[in-house]
Image (spheres, rainbow, N blue to C red):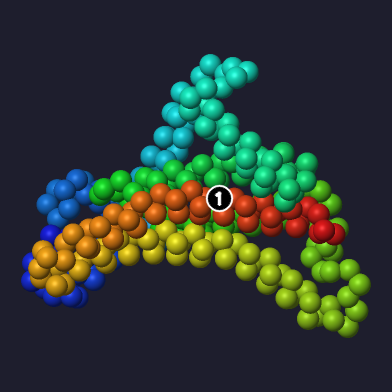
Amino acid sequence: MGVAYAAGGEGEHSIGDAILHHVQDTNVIEIWPGHLYIPLPQIHLFGIDFSITKHLILMWVACLVLVLVFRRVFKNPSAVPSGMANVFEAIVVFLRDEVIVPAMGEDGKRYLPYLLTVFFFILTCNLLGLIPWSATATGNISVTAGLALIALFMVQLGGIREHGLVHHAMNLVPPGIPFWLLPIMIPVELLGQLTKPFALCIRLYANMTAGHLVILSFLALIFVMKTFVIAPVAVGFALFINILEIFIAFLQAYIFTMLTSLFMGMSIHPEH
């Protein structure tokens, strides 16, 4: 599989398969693409697939990295942080003061643990995907859908916690709506509650997948053109996009966190 497989003379169709192979989830971890790999357990219970996949392993690695890094950085907290502790504190303070509190008010501080966890988890998964022979877990729509469902739950939880179940349900419909419009507005507003996490899911999935497809497409040009003359240009563009992917990794984690806090703020303060 991989680029080595694509170069075997199968033509453009094989190159397309190779590109898709690199962005799709698999039941193996490749040590050397097409030659050496570690099979992962395949588990099926009650007709449901609980198999361990490469993206799941990468999410576990992201969680482990976050735990180890934060325990190491903040092992000895001090009033004046330095080094990496200063970097992480700057990120946390920026998200708190410039993103979460403006969107949710002071009530947003109680949701800081969730929102900061989401940001650093997505960021770590994005950055892990830039390592050669690794994979981007956030390029899996099942992963982004899971994150979006959690965001939907937190949006509703925030509104219920602030106003109570009945009042929160009433807040879904804008005040002052004529009674005869309620049969139309209620389904529309309920649909709106679902489209918000759907947008979070598709935005993160599409952006993280698109970057890898572009990089692999540039590299595949060498095999499509069947000449190494184009290699400097193809590799140069691929390297540029790869550097840009570092910025996108931070940007997409920020956007997901910002939109989640914004949707939660709309649920907590529907009058704004």
In the rendered view, would you say 207 is above or below 120? below
Q: Residue at x 63, y 18 (%)?
A: 79
Q: Give the x, y percent position of residue 98.
A: 67, 45
In the displayed structure, 161 sits above or below 216; it is: above
Mark 1: give few (<14), some (14-19) or many (20+) Cα within 10 Å.
many
Query: In the rendered image, is residue 159 in sight?
Result: no
Residue shown at 18%/59% (left/top)?
A: 232
Q: Residue at x 53, y 16 (%)?
A: 76
Residue 96 visible to the viewer: yes
Residue 130 rendering spot, x and y as whole percentages: 34, 49
Residue in the foreground of this view, choosing between 19 and 219: 219
Residue with the mark numbered 1: 254
Q: Quadrant of residue 59?
A: top left
- Describe residue 124's horizontal placement relative to residue 177 as left or right: left
**Number of numbered discs on residues:** 1
Residue 149 x/y as whole percent: 58, 57
Residue 45 or residue 78, whichever sits in front:
78
Quadrant position of the C terminus in the picture: bottom right
- Which sits in the foreground, 257 or 41? 257
Eyeballing the image, is 141 above or below 108?
below
SS for callout 1: helix
What residue sits 30% from the left and 46% below the top? 131
Where residue 106 sits, quadrant-wise, is: top right
Front residue of 250/155: it is 250
- Quadrant where the N terminus lies? bottom left
Eyeballing the image, is 227 above or below 181?
above
Left/right placement of residue 263 relative to residue 40 reads: right
Q: Which residue type does callout 1 highlight?
A: Tyr
The image position of residue 66, as x and y in percent, is 46, 35
